[in-house]
Image: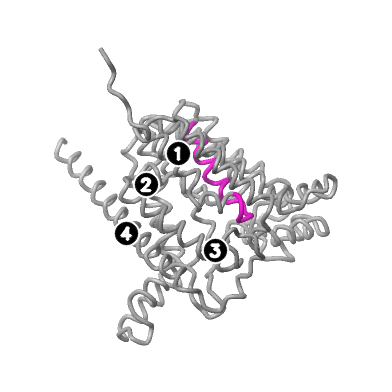
Amino acid sequence: MNEKPTRWYSRSGIWFWSAIALGAAVRFYLVIFTEGTSDVSIWGQHAIGVNNLGVVNYYHSNPAANHPPFMLELVLLLGKTTQVLGILFPIMLRAPFALLDAASAALLYSLLSFHRYRALLVATYWINPLSIILSSYQGNTDSAVAFFLLLSVWFLSKQRIAGAAIAIGISLWVKVPGVLAIPALVWYLPSWRRRALFLVGIVLVGTIGYLPALLQDPAVIAQNVFGYHGRLLQSPAGEPAWGPRVLFFSLIAPPDKWPDYLHAPIVFFLQHSWQIAVLCSLALGLLWQSRRSIPNLCATIAVLYLPIYGLTDNWAFQYFAWSLPFWFFLPFWFSIPAVILSSGYIYSLYWTLCGDPFLRGKWDFGGTLVWPSSVIIFRNPAVLFFSLSACAFLVTAIYVYAKSKRQLQTLK
């Protein structure tokens, strides 16, 4: 019996490997021939500060040093390696994360084995401007969050709980936001014993990465690293880069047009938006506990980061990298607009800020007083889309959870 022929997009033919080669070439170009954002120079300052003062003293001298001790020690090592090898620091800093993004694409290909469009989805992830820029141009560690989350899920798909716990624990050495996915990962496991072992493994492995600084001064670690919750980004003219301020004041109406009785609740929401977003993320991780399959787990991880993108001003451009690969486990009505709008916004803004479509210019966030319409035309619908999506998924999760509880009570 002849098998039904498959479409080109459902198999990894020459078109797929051409897309992989293209994505690799663009990443190579960005790492070698561009300077990156101001994050690169900030990491250079971290390396100098740690070299002069040591990790703990540097935390005290620079409250803006919000990365875990492991990464501060690692960037110091990278800085010394550049001097020995004669490689420019921006290249040495960004190359590992570009390679890590390639590993993320490989894990994504494995986890999407159930999907008829697997090859197309992975190729889309690999060549879309957002994943390319954040992994190979930005100059920060955020793409590592997605890699370790993918790795943890991959270990769980192989029933390797220890490996999954180690992956999450190591992720906390690099950056903290992976902790938001822990409730979803815990509820995926079928028994309390396995959940307890998983959590113990995360704590043990995670703690190792904070030693000896954690023993020397736990208070400064808590304040600088675990107490950091992003910051408000605005253009020199006061134009918000993202968040509810865009939604309330640019898309709906300026503050002076709002009725007086709305001022207090809006101000309260803006002042506490990051706490509200984190609580919503944790709620999503808990409410979707009944969906115990690898595809649903990946979809849950994608969803639980949406409140961070849609409900708070305490945000930075590279935060998209935390969950970007997991977007492809959600329905096309979300993944396609999310990729298009966020890629369009980030690329158009970065083009504006460095003055070159190939991102070869020097990053200058303060040099452009007013962002052009080519940026705003992507920013506004992107903010609206992520805000509405966060609310829609939260309402859906509450509804499904309540419905399942009613069904259980009926069976009893």
**What element does badge 2 sit on?**
helix
Kindly identify which residue carries mark 2: 286
Please state which of residues 109 and 29 is positioned toward the viewer in this rendering. Answer: 29
Residue 62: image location, x then y, percent: 71, 65
**What element does badge 4 sit on?**
helix
Kindly identify which residue carries mark 1: 122
Label 3 sits on what residue type?
Answer: Gly
Instruction: Judge whether 324 appears above or below 223 on screen.
Output: above
Kindly identify which residue carries mark 3: 230
Task: Answer with the quarter of the image where residue 342 lies.
Answer: bottom left
Please state which of residues 235 and 363 is positioned toward the viewer in this rendering. Answer: 363
Q: Residue at x 41, y 68 (%)?
A: 377
Instruction: Judge whether 277 appears above or below 168 on screen.
Output: below
Asked if the magenta segment contains residue 152, the reply would be yes
Q: Give the magenta range.
A: 136-154
**What element does badge 3 sit on?**
loop
Of all residues shown, which one is farthest toward the top? 1
**What element does badge 1 sit on?**
helix
Instruction: Judge whether 334 appears above or below 409 on screen.
Output: below
Instruction: Give whichever of discs 4 and 2 has the lower sequence position.
Output: 2
What is the magenta segment's predominant secondary structure? Answer: helix
Label 2 sits on what residue type?
Answer: Leu
Instruction: Give whichever of discs 1 and 2 has the lower sequence position.
Output: 1
